[in-house]
Structure formats: structure tokens, C-alpha cells
Amino acid sequence: MRKLFAGLAALLMLVIVAQFYFAASGAFSTAPNDESFRPHRALGYVIFLLPVLMTLVAALARMPGRLIGMASLIAGLTVVQVVIAVLARAFNDTGDTSTTAGQLIFGLHAINGLIILHVTGIVARQARVLSRSAVPHRRAGAGDDARVSGPAAGTAQPAS
């Protein structure tokens, strides 16, 4: 389960990087906003669902509570992204053509996106460490078929 969590965390990092790419390509597109930001908006749903799934997997794997909390924090920050976008659109509808409050609020969308990227990086790093330590190291015992020689097997090696 820990390896699955680490894989989901790595996947989430890739999805977030793609999200930044789609945001930039949408910002510089000549198409209308609804069309140009469609991939960015669609990927936002994935960025919400992946950390929810990660939270469930982490809880089932009995991972540290802090890691479970940070996975759910990513989902919460994704909800904040939607709230920022809705507020920015609401303030843009005032009809003012100069720099509007909506544009200033929408700047928080990018800052929150960077926070999401940072928290995801922390989660991915910790998940990778935990998944590596999850591999049990077996000792060869009397009931094992492993052939052990040397001090571990109880045979003395002749001194040279």
C-alpha cells in the first residue's frame, strides 16, 4: 500500500506540472477563455480526486497521521482554488475595465497553486522514503532454504 501511495504522489506531481503548463498555454491562447482553459479546468478535477484517493490509501496503509493530513490538505487547497476562481469572476463582472479586484484576487490562484505544488513535493518525498523502508529485510533462519556461510551460519572461517 505504501508503494501505491508513493506512486499516486508521484503521479500527482506530474499532473500538477501539467496543470501549470495548461494554465500558461491557456493564458497565451488566442481562443476564448472558455476554450483555452478547458484542459486546465478538467485537470483540476483530477488534482482534487487524486489527493482524496491518496488520503484513503494512506489511512488504509496506516501511514503517519501527518502524511494523511497533508494529503487531505492538498484536496482542501484544490477546493480553495475553485473558490478563488469563483470570487475573481464575481468581482470581474462589475464592468470596470481597469485593473479590477477580480484580477487581484485571481493572482491568489497562482500563489495557491504554488503552495499545492510545494505540499505535494513534501508528500511525494516522504512517501518515497516510507515506501523504501516498507521492504522488510529478512534474516536467514534455521527454517529458511537460504545457504549461509561464514559467521552468520556458525562456521568459523580459517585465519590466513
Image (cartoon, rainbow, N blue to C red):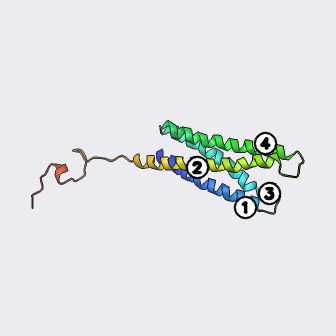
Disc on the earlier residue, 1 or 3? 1
Residue pointed to by mark 3:
35
- Label 1 vs label 3: CA separation? 11 Å
Q: Position of residue 100 (x, y in %)?
A: 83, 48
Going by the numbered disc 2, the residue's amino acid type is His
Q: In the drawing, does residue 102 fall left or right of residue 45? A: right
- Label 3 vs label 2: CA separation? 28 Å
Name which residue lies at 12% across and 53% down: 156
Residue pointed to by mark 1:
25
Going by the numbered disc 3, the residue's amino acid type is Glu
Disc on the earlier residue, 4 or 2? 4
Which is more toward the observer, 115 or 101? Answer: 101
Going by the numbered disc 1, the residue's amino acid type is Ser
Which is more toward the observer, 115 or 12? Answer: 115
The reply to whether the C-beta atoms of the residues labelled 4 and 2 are less than 8 Å apart is no
| Residue mark closest to the camera, 2 vs 1 | 2
Q: Position of residue 10 (x, y in %)?
A: 54, 53
| Residue mark closest to the camera, 1 vs 4 | 4
Q: In the drawing, does residue 105 fall left or right of residue 6? A: right
Residue pointed to by mark 4:
87
The reply to whether the C-beta atoms of the residues labelled 4 and 3 are less than 8 Å apart is no
- Label 4 vs label 3: CA separation? 20 Å
Circle 3 Cα neighbour tier, 10 Å, few/some/many (<14 / 14–19 / ≥20):
few
Q: Position of residue 87 (x, y in %)?
A: 78, 42
Residue pointed to by mark 2:
118
Where disc 1 sits, the SS reads helix
Q: In the drawing, does residue 45 fall left or right of residue 96? A: left
| Residue mark closest to the camera, 4 vs 3 | 4
Going by the numbered disc 4, the residue's amino acid type is Leu
Kindly tell me whether residue 37 is visible in this rendering. yes
